[in-house]
């Protein structure tokens, strides 16, 4: 929540729910990552918030970009990144999309199985590939396990296969889970990565790079480690597992780069009870389908601010759509002031990441979440 954002909302009084992102905060975050991990290249995970102003700012600061689709590759190029600053980090790609990225000059691709290696070898001959390994995601609030990555033992074969297919077996990647509040969560995956480096080195294949992924937390309700604490813990883990043969490293912050830069302005549409004396239900003009998808399973709990200062009591929070799953906090109700009223404005902080892109086009006729980047 910055004065610039509050000022913007006061001056422009935008109608309807909207996200306001303060670019100064994004810049501060980028510089903090650079300071905390000076030996790592930063690849911003575009999916977190692909607003052109954000990509343009980061491109100007020297950031690289982790892209999951040809469309994201194009957004990074338009923002001013040259293709050598782009990684096609999705392990699940159509073969023609690999070809399209290669034609645009992209030479760095993620894989997690031999079939994907074969696609890259056919469409991006000579490119660098890194193999993603499975990671438990323990301690993360939004785990990214299971769907991506292979067992470390299999990664050895995948990279060996890539080498034999004429690709550059370049390194290993993993993601410790998003909103990972434990800076030591990187340790076990780094141990696996070092082991993969050793086995392949014995086979004459010298890997170069470890992609440390994202996972850096943004501040919601609870305290989180600073960039410096992550940097310290990760550097210690790299040194303990790789000794003095340090690999190149890259990081792919998404949430940690933009989460705290955004605030959503929302309005209370209705406050009601299901029975006399029951818990209050507070219905907002924003819910799971127009920006707050990460409240799914009540995973992410955003700070919600009101100008009312009455005593707070737990409420069920729900969105405006006609889908009964559009309920945000029911298992663990959310405390809101007792004197909250219909028509009140609420500010939802920490919403710079994973909101606009998760917003549906016109469910119930509601427009996608409006975004202002200032
Ligand atoms: C989503 C994603 C990221 C960003 O993760 P955060 O937890 O938001 O930092 C980084 N790398 C890959 C491959 C991803 O899929």
Image (tube, rainbow, N blue to C red):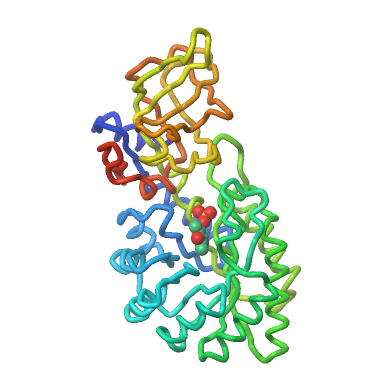
Query: Can you tell which quarter of the image residue 208 is in?
Result: bottom right
22 or 131: which is nearer to us?
A: 131
As drawn, is 304 to the left or to the right of 320? Answer: right
Looking at the image, residue 182 lies above or below residue 72: above
- Which quarter shows the C terminus? top left
Q: How many marks can you see?
A: 0
The residue lying at 59 percent from left, 54 percent from top is 177
- Which quarter shows the N terminus? top left
Residue 85, image x, y percentages: 41, 72
The residue lying at 55 percent from left, 85 percent from top is 162
As drawn, is 200 to the left or to the right of 162? Answer: right
Residue 239, image x, y percentages: 72, 69
The residue lying at 48 percent from left, 55 percent from top is 254
Looking at the image, residue 178 lies above or below residue 115: above
65 or 318: which is nearer to us?
A: 318
Residue 74, image x, y percentages: 31, 68
Residue 350, image x, y percentages: 47, 40
Residue 39 seen in render: no
Query: Can you tell which quarter of the image residue 171 is in?
Result: bottom right
As drawn, is 206 to the left or to the right of 11? Answer: right
The residue lying at 62 percent from left, 86 percent from top is 160
Residue 317 seen in render: yes
């Amino acid at each position: 929540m910055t004065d610039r954002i509050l000022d913007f909302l006061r001056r422009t009084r935008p109608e309807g729910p909207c996200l306001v992102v303060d670019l100064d905060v994004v810049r501060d975050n980028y510089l903090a990552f650079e300071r905390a991990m000076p030996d790592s290249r930063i690849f911003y995970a575009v999916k977190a918030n692909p607003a052109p102003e954000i990509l343009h700012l980061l491109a100007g600061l020297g950031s690289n970009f982790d892209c999951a689709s040809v469309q994201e590759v194009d957004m990074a190029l338009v923002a001013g990144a040259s293709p050598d600053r782009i990684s096609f980090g999705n392990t699940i790609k159509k073969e023609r999309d690999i070809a399209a990225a290669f034609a645009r000059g992209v030479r760095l691709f993620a894989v997690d199985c031999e079939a994907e290696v074969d696609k890259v070898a056919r469409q991006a001959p000579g490119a660098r590939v890194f193999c993603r390994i499975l990671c438990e995601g323990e301690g993360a609030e939004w785990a990214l396990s299971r769907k991506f990555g292979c067992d470390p033992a299999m990664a050895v074969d995948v990279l060996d296969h890539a080498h034999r297919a004429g690709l550059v077996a370049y390194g290993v990647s993993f993601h410790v889970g998003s909103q990972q509040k434990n800076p030591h969560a990187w340790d076990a995956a780094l141990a696996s990565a070092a082991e993969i480096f050793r086995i392949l080195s014995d086979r004459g294949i010298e890997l170069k790079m470890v992609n440390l992924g994202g996972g850096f937390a943004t501040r919601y309700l609870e305290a989180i480690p600073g960039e410096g604490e992550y940097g310290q813990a990760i550097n210690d883990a790299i040194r303990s597992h790789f000794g003095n043969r340090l690999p190149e490293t890259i990081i792919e912050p998404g949430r940690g780069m933009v989460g705290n830069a955004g605030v959503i302005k929302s309005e209370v549409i209705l406050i009601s009870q299901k029975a006399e004396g029951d818990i209050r239900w507070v219905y907002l003009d924003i819910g799971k389908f127009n920006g707050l998808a990460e409240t799914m399973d009540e995973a992410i709990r955003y700070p919600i601010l009101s100008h009312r200062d009455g005593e707070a009591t737990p409420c069920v929070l729900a969105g405006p759509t006609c889908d009964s799953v559009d309920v945000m906090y029911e298992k663990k109700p959310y405390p809101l002031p007792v004197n909250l009223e219909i028509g009140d404005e609420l500010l939802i902080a920490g919403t710079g990441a994973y909101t606009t892109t998760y917003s549906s086009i016109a469910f119930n006729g509601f427009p996608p979440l409006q975004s202002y980047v200032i």
